[in-house]
Image (tube, grey):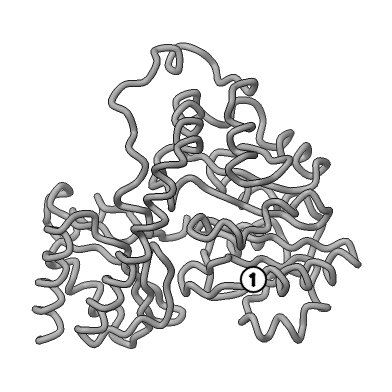
């Protein structure tokens, strides 16, 4: 099992700070996510999940696509997709969400991590290319033209382009979801980041119908709980909340970048939900903030820390006070 953001209870035990006393900025999840209602219909607890509900239709409208498959978080697809190909040469634009590399390697494929400019030069050496857009953790973005050029080259030899769009909800016009009915193009989406609903464990795969059928067969019946399906329908249909979030999140991310800059922590990249700081002092900064009950995400290749957004003003002040202390030491 790989190490990810979150895991708050383990850090709480390590630093002897109660879980409720932590400020968790490690995940890149919208801290002011879609407001979940206090009560749900009783039927979501007493009935098996029903694929004939409104989930798929609401998702098609939101993602502007004609066909998709609901999965138990995009992680479910990340784990399953490698089993749908024979031994392949796989390129991942890195640094990247580590589960992509891990799952393809575990399935016996040859995996190479490289930078995007290297992929332009060597794409003919690979059968599968995996791109996160915007990238997690660097925030690097890729134009539709560039991605579709890679797709054309891969598809010509029956290859795949997998585009993980977990953080693209702020700029839906840049998504390739509406084009993913083409063979060889696979798009992954999630309700975990922009909507702040990571606990639902719900995502979507957009791809050619044949591949979606293969994936559905692999995943088996009832992969998503009834409660998750019901809540997702409401969130996907809440266009007012979505508009507000798209207006507010960029300002908050800019505020975070300015706060880090003021403490000589210069973001090397980021998006509306996080800022990424490359520094040889990453491990020290991570430890010092943890000693103040603030959890950021630590990376070792390259050495870096990623900061998510604080939720409320007291959280912003708490982060600022902690940064004041550790940058003076």
Which residue is denoted by mark 1 in the rendering?
92
Identify the residue at image location x=26%, y=53%: 8
Position above or below: 151 against 213: below
Quadrant of the rendered image containing residue 27: bottom left
- Percent from the top left, x then y, of residue 295? 24, 63
Q: Nearer the viewer, residue 83 or 329?
A: 329
Position above or below: 49 against 94: above
Looking at the rendering, in which quadrant would you find the C terminus?
A: bottom left
- Percent from the top left, x then y, of residue 109? 73, 63
- Disc 1 residue crowd, few under 14, some 14–19, many 20+, Cα 10 Å: many
Position above or below: 208 against 2: above
Q: Nearer the viewer, residue 66 or 321?
A: 66
Furthest residue in direction right, as rendered: 156
- Percent from the top left, x then y, of residue 325? 9, 78
* 54 horizontally vs 82: left or right: left
* 304 horizontally vs 190: left or right: left
Q: Nearer the viewer, residue 191 or 83?
A: 191
Count of numbered labels shown in the rendering: 1
- Secondary structure at numbered mark 1: strand
Identify the residue at image location x=78%, y=61%: 160
Identify the residue at image location x=46%, y=31%: 234
Identify the residue at image location x=43%, y=68%: 271
């Amino acid at each position: 099992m790989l190490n990810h953001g979150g895991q708050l209870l383990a850090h709480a035990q390590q630093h002897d700070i109660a879980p409720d006393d932590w400020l968790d900025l490690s995940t890149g999840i919208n801290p002011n996510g879609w407001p979940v209602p206090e009560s749900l219909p009783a039927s979501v607890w007493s009935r098996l999940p029903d694929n004939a509900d409104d989930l798929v239709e609401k998702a098609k409208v939101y993602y502007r696509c004609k066909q998709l498959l609901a999965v138990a978080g995009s992680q479910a697809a990340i784990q399953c997709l490698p089993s749908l190909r024979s031994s392949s040469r796989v390129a991942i634009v890195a640094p990247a969400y580590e589960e992509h590399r891990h799952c393809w390697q575990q399935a016996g494929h040859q995996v190479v991590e490289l930078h995007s400019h290297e992929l332009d030069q060597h794409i003919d050496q690979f059968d599968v290319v995996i791109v996160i857009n915007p990238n997690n953790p660097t925030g690097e973005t890729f134009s539709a033209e560039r991605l579709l050029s890679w797709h054309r080259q891969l598809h010509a030899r029956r290859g795949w382009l997998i585009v993980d769009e977990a953080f693209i909800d702020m700029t839906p016009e840049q998504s390739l979801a509406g084009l993913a009915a083409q063979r060889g193009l696979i798009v992954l989406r999630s309700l975990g980041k922009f909507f702040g609903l990571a606990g639902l464990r719900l995502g979507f795969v957009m791809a050619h119908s044949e591949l979606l059928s293969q994936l559905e067969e692999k995943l088996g019946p009832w992969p998503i709980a009834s409660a998750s399906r019901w809540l997702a329908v409401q969130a996907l249909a809440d266009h007012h909340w979505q508009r507000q979030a798209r207006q507010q999140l960029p300002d908050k991310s800019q505020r975070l970048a300015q706060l880090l800059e003021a403490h000589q922590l210069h973001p090397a990249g980021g998006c509306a939900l996080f800022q990424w700081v490359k520094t040889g002092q990453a491990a020290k900064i991570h430890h010092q903030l943890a000693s103040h009950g603030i959890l950021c995400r630590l990376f070792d290749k390259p050495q870096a820390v990623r900061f998510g957004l604080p939720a409320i003003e007291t959280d912003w002040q708490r982060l600022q006070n902690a940064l004041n202390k550790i940058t003076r030491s």
